[in-house]
Image: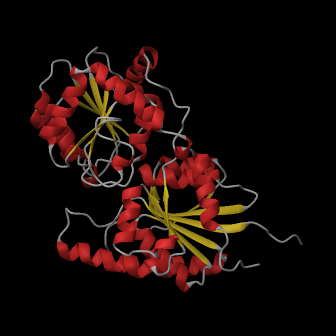
Amino acid sequence: MKTEQRLRVATVITRFEAGAGIVALRGVQALDPAAYRTTIVTGSGDRLLGLASDAGIEVIVESTLRSPIAPADDIRALHRLTRLFTRRGFHIVHTHSAKAGTLGRLAAHRAGVPHIVHTFHGLPYHEFQSAARRGAYIRIERYVGQLTDAALCVGSAVSVEVVRRGLVRPERVRTIGVPVDLDAPVRTPATRARAREALGLTGAGPVVGAVGRLAHQKHPEAFVRALAAMRRPGLTGVWIGGGELADRVHKLAVREGAPVLFAGERPDVPNLLPAFDVFALPSRYEGLPVAIVEAMVSGVPVVATAVNSVPDVVVPGRTGLLVPPQRPDLLALAVGHLLDHPREAARLAAEARARIGDGFSSKALGEELADAYTPPRAARP
């Protein structure tokens, strides 16, 4: 009987959706199938579940793996993951996101998995939490960091924070980019018109767009309030993405009189980005969002909040404009400035697109993963 020579990898993520889910999926797809056999383990997911299945990737949905802190479910998830890792004999467990990162790494250690990798898409603690909660999250990350053979950090600011806080040993920390389609449509009059038609936009006025989950982190309320404050004739805002705050944000837009179209989840985001005259990122905190890099590849000028690794790509006055988080008034001013100064906006967009190089390709991520996965301390037969 022929012995399986490939390394068995479990990619574990709490929610297989949005930017972190895209990075996880594209990373798996970029690995050499002759060298790795990957199983995705997730608590929930959206259209990415179908994409993974269509690509022939095994997906296991473990419903006890949930984002909110829920001690009973968390304990069950830890036991179930431990049994799964033991039974399947994975050589490598690679976790993404805070909850999966904690439970997945603990389970992998308990199961004797030879090599444990974690991707920090951002940090589970931030300035908008209480000091007690921040401190608890840091202590947890330091503990599971001792079990981590390689930490892949999305963006240099995330890497710096991981090192500064001592979450993982310095020699195990690596900085990676986010994988995007470098051949996505570039904003031209033709692609702009097609994208607007696909979104159902009929007016000729300016369009300000955002992409992300309607969730606390992304602060969609700031986007709505900024659009309302601009009071610009013909202006339309577009938010692509769904989430738990959908009802609240929809009601806020009506109450504020903000001209925002909520487009919901869309599988064709790169094709829709050329519809935007300005891309806005209002997040409270981030790692390095896939959507902001995709906007730059598409040649759309960017205004973003100055958080975490966003300044890796949005360099003020060179590749975009930055504003403080939770300041919709300043977000409105910055967006309005680019709309009023199209030559400056075009210059920023052109330089941003020129700076997005091969380091943001799926191929580059696949190479980073192969390096992080090799060699495990010991490989099971």
Q: Would you say residue 30 is visible in this rendering? A: yes
**Observer-nearest of 296 and 106:** 296
**Observer-nearest of 357 and 227:** 357
Judge left or right: residue 61 versus residue 31.
left
Q: Residue at x 54, y 36 (%)?
A: 182
Q: Residue at x 33, y 41 (%)?
A: 315
Judge left or right: residue 246 versus residue 376.
left
| Residue 268, horizontal then vertical, whole percent | 47, 34
Q: Would you say residue 277 is visible in this rendering? A: no
Above or below — where is 207 with respect to 159?
above
The N terminus sits in image quarter: bottom right
Q: Quadrant of residue 225?
A: top left
Q: Residue furthest front?
A: 318
Q: How many numbered discs sit on the rendered protein? A: 0
Above or below — where is 209 with respect to 340?
below
| Residue 144, horizontal then vertical, whole percent | 43, 79
| Residue 338, horizontal then vertical, whole percent | 25, 26
Above or below — where is 155 with respect to 253?
below
Q: Quadrant of residue 239?
A: top left
**Observer-nearest of 212 and 373:** 373
Q: Quadrant of residue 6?
A: bottom right
| Residue 366, horizontal then vertical, whole percent | 62, 53
Judge left or right: residue 27 versus residue 19.
right
Q: Residue at x 31, y 72 (%)?
A: 69
The C terminus sits in image quarter: bottom right
